[in-house]
Image: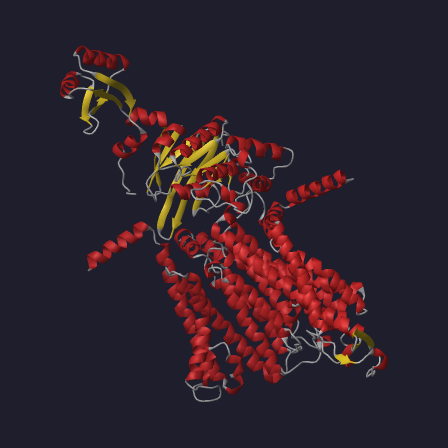
């Protein structure tokens, strides 16, 4: 019997190793007696401390149950010492234990796993071992999936040991096992999404010298904490609720019915019942939330795997290809705007801001995702950028639309168009007096984004050290500096010089107070900036496109002239 | 495309900024050849090897491995199975044992049981690390790690082996062991491209060499042809007595072009253009003159001398 079991185990290990060698390697590296022992011990101690913490919330009283004064019905009396007793509503207490166990599992799995993945991938990238793996015939998908399943192995072990308590607490709180499993399912889907994000951060964040693991996991911790007892804003920002598994918790715990119970549950999204997407009431039932959440995490994890696979194969390629960016933009604005389309519209001004600010943020991200490597751009300019023939010019246009190594300004403008059309339609569905501010804000924001993209490309075409810092500086500088400068100078919207705010992405906030002529004037300024930067970019690309001989002749001519 | 050609490149170019590391390189390396890449630092040897290993994308040009085109930004799984690459400074997983490490790479290259187990034993025996298979990688010496690296490179039986400075940093004994290993692989029929600064090693290993300078392949020839066209025969003579009578006799010999006396060892190195019979006649004349000769040796000018003295270098290291 023992032999059969060990043969089955070894066959299982063999099959697992053949299916995904990377997963096998990660488990082998972590399955050391000391690490496993420490993990098991930590998980059990943490569960003990957690129960002790919850136990301390029960109010102790002096006396005994026989003489106890029952203050509320439905509470049980428990003698905990010769002269001490507690009055407790057990189902409600277990509900608290269950809700907190969900939250702790969520934080432990997501934040802990992300930290481990980012640091592991960064370390491998720094050591150069990742190059060797990528030289093997295995696909990027197999290798990265192996990392995702194997690196947080000890976190999985600790969580696995906590599952009995999690389920026991849920069942004791009279929650059906299927409902508990629905939370766990959404949590797993969110882990797949966040771990994909962690892999990407690990691959691209090496310039942060190891700080990326802290930065990435702390960022996600903050994002998850942001949802602590947060309410729906009834704007497009509600899209963010689809990024936390805690969104399903009120449905699992039936908090809507437990309102009468004294203490609020953690992550109690109060008005989540009103959650809508293209007026579909997704918040009306837990199953709708679960299905939407699974689809949402699946969709964005799928999108995260596009840059992951590209970068793993070639560390210098842009994170997204140009055609991929068009689809990603369409996808984002479709799913995002869905939350702004409500059966009963909210305050239009804040609704417009909630669309245009993420519009700007999306395009800042898009500029980074499409950014070609400096060398690729130089090579493109040298070998493909300038064709004298008509066929060659056509090729250049095709390259600008599709090729990874060509400049990005054409692709950004197409993306602006893709995003602009649905936003425009949505703005026109708002009350008429919001049209001017909405449409004008969108137009000015779009031209300004184009300016940022061109400025970023012009600066990054120069030979710079610390390029990644320059990327951040060229993207955030033009947004934050003018805004801060105007605020410091005391210029405010509606005052003298307030029109200067049209040079910041917050133009939509002041458009109502300005005349159409002023707005057009500033629109002209934007177009002039675009023209100037396009000219500068073309000049730079032309210079990169020169052959060594051309350069040599040019230098000789300069010497002759001087 | 002939199946005898293991590697072919067409207009292969790689630029770093404006610097052209490999420039419009066309090369053909036959199956079973051991091709040595020689050149000063920065000549483009490592870049060329990295491009062949798919670790670097070329700026322009194409690479064919056994007639199959290496496609850009694709997994190229079939071609990767044919290539084994050992760079100059390669990292290892120090948390694994030797067996686990090789087993992991064998799995990455899709070797299945029971062949994988057999292959692991074969490779460990070849690199003489069988006794260390349960040891942690971290506990190995540098020479052992280099051999483990080679074992990892050949675990999947590639047909093309790319070795970049494989013996740099090894002690003389480890170098000899490594050289022997390469010879075994050569006999097994692998095509090997090897770059090294230690030209004496290349002379012993290679069937042909390519000389790179400033990103160009300035010379590609068989070692035999290189010796014939550029190498000269030398005679090394050592005497217990004075060197002057030897020099007098050398001056009379029509096959001796010039000579030089090593000041420290008092040995004479003479450029000789004759055949074996004429060398024997020279030795006879020296002995007849009663000169106490204790060493008379015909030697071929080595690769290092040819590389340093006979080739017109445009690039400094």
Does A42 appear above or below A1? below
In the picture provided, is A114 more to the left or to the right than A485?
A: right
Rendered location of residue B77, percent (x, y): 56, 42
Q: Quadrant of residue A201?
A: bottom right
Query: Which residue extends farthest right?
Result: A66
Rendered location of residue A273, percent (x, y): 73, 75
- Residue placed most toward the observer, B136 or A545: B136
Q: Which residue is at a point 40% across and 42% down the rendered structure image? A: B46
In the picture provided, is B235 more to the left or to the right than B12?
A: left
- Residue placed most toward the observer, B292 or B192: B292
In the picture provided, is A359 more to the left or to the right than A51?
A: left
Q: Which residue is at a point 32% across and 50% down the rendered structure image? A: A548
- Residue placed most toward the observer, A24 or B251: A24
Query: Which residue extends farthest bottom?
Result: A495
Does A519 appear above or below B74? below
Rendered location of residue B173, percent (x, y): 40, 32
Is residue A300 in view from this perspective? no
Q: How many marks?
A: 0
Does B251 appear above or below A5? above
Q: Which residue is at a point 51% across and 79% down the rendered structure image? A: A506
């Amino acid at each position: 019997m023992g032999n059969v079991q060990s043969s089955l185990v070894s066959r299982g290990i063999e099959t697992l190793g053949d299916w995904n060698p990377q997963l096998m390697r990660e488990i082998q590296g972590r399955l050391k007696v000391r690490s496993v022992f420490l993990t098991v011990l930590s998980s059990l101690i943490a569960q003990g401390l957690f129960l002790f913490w919850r136990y301390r919330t029960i109010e102790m009283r002096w006396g005994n149950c026989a003489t106890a004064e029952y203050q509320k019905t439905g509470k049980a009396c428990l003698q905990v010492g010769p002269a001490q007793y507690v009055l407790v509503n057990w189902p409600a207490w277990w509900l608290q234990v269950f809700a907190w166990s969900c939250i702790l599992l969520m934080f432990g799995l997501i934040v802990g796993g992300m930290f481990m993945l980012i640091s592991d991938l960064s370390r491998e990238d720094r050591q150069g071992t990742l190059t060797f793996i990528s030289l093997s015939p295995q696909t990027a998908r197999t290798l990265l999936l192996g990392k995702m399943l194997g690196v947080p192995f000890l976190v999985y072990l600790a969580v696995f040991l906590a599952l009995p308590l999690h389920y026991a607490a849920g069942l004791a709180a009279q929650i059906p096992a299927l409902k508990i499993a629905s939370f766990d399912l959404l949590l797993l889907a969110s882990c797949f999404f966040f771990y994909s994000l962690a892999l990407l951060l690990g691959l691209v964040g090496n310039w942060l010298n190891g700080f990326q693991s802290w930065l990435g996991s702390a960022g996600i911790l903050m994002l998850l904490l942001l949802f602590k007892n947060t309410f729906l804003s009834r704007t497009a920002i509600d899209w963010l609720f689809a990024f936390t598994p805690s969104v399903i918790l009120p449905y699992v715990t039936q908090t809507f019915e437990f309102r009468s119970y004294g203490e609020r549950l953690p992550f109690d999204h109060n008005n989540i019942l009103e959650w809508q997407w293209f007026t579909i009431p997704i918040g009306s039932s837990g199953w709708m939330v679960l299905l939407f959440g699974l689809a949402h995490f699946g969709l964005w994890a799928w999108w995260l795997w596009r840059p992951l696979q590209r970068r793993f194969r070639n560390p210098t390629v842009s994170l997204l290809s140009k055609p991929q960016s068009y689809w990603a933009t369409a996808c984002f604005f479709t799913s995002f705007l869905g939350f702004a389309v409500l059966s009963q519209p909210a305050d239009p001004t804040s609704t417009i801001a909630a669309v245009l600010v993420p519009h700007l943020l999306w395009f800042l991200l898009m500029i980074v995702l499409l950014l070609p490597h400096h060398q690729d751009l130089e090579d493109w300019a040298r070998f493909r950028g300038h064709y004298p023939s008509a066929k060659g010019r056509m090729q250049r246009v095709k390259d600008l639309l599709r090729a990874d190594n060509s400049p990005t300004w054409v692709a950004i403008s197409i993306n602006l168009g893709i995003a602009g059309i649905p936003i425009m339609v949505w703005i026109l569905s708002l009350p008429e007096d919001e049209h001017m501010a909405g449409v004008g804000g969108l137009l000015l924001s779009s031209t300004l984004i184009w300016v940022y993209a061109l400025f970023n490309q012009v600066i990054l075409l120069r030979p710079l050290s610390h390029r990644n810092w320059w990327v951040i500086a060229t993207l955030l500088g033009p947004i934050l500096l003018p805004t801060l400068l105007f605020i410091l100078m005391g210029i405010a919207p509606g005052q003298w010089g307030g029109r200067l705010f049209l040079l910041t992405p917050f133009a939509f906030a002041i458009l109502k107070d300005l005349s159409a002529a002023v707005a057009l004037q500033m629109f002209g300024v934007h177009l002039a900036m675009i023209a100037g930067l396009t000219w500068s970019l073309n000049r730079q690309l032309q210079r990169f496109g020169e052959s060594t001989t051309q350069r040599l002749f040019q230098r000789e001519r300069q010497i002759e002239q001087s | 495309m002939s199946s005898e050609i293991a590697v072919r490149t067409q207009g292969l170019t790689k630029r770093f900024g404006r610097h052209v590391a490999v420039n419009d390189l066309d090369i053909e390396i036959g199956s079973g050849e051991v091709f040595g890449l020689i050149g000063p630092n920065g000549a483009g040897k490592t870049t060329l090897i990295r491009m062949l290993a798919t670790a670097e994308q070329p700026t322009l040009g194409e690479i064919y491995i056994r007639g199959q085109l290496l496609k850009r930004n694709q997994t190229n799984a079939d071609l990767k199975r044919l290539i084994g690459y050992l760079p100059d400074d390669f990292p290892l997983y120090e948390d694994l044992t030797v067996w686990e490490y090789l087993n992991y790479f064998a799995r990455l290259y899709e070797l299945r049981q029971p062949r994988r187990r057999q292959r692991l034993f074969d490779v460990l025996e070849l690199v003489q690390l069988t006794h260390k298979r349960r040891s942690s990688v971290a506990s190995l010496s540098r020479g052992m790690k280099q051999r483990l690296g080679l074992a990892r490179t050949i675990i999947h039986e590639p047909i093309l082996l790319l070795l970049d400075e494989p013996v740099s940093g090894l002690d003389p004994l480890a170098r000899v062991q490594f050289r022997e290993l390469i010879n075994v692989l050569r006999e097994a029929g692998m095509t090997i491209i090897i770059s090294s600064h230690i030209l004496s090693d290349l002379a012993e290993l290679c069937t042909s060499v390519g000389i790179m300078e400033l990103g160009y392949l300035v010379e590609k020839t068989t070692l035999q042809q290189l010796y014939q066209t550029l190498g000269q025969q030398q005679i090394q003579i050592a005497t217990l007595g004075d060197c002057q009578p030897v020099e007098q006799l050398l001056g009379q010999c029509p096959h001796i072009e010039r000579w030089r006396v090593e000041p420290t060892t008092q040995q004479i190195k003479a450029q000789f253009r004759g055949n074996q019979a004429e060398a024997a006649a020279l030795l006879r004349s020296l002995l007849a003159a009663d000169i106490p000769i204790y060493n008379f040796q015909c030697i071929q000018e080595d690769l290092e001398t040819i590389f340093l003295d006979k080739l017109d270098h445009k690039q400094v290291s």
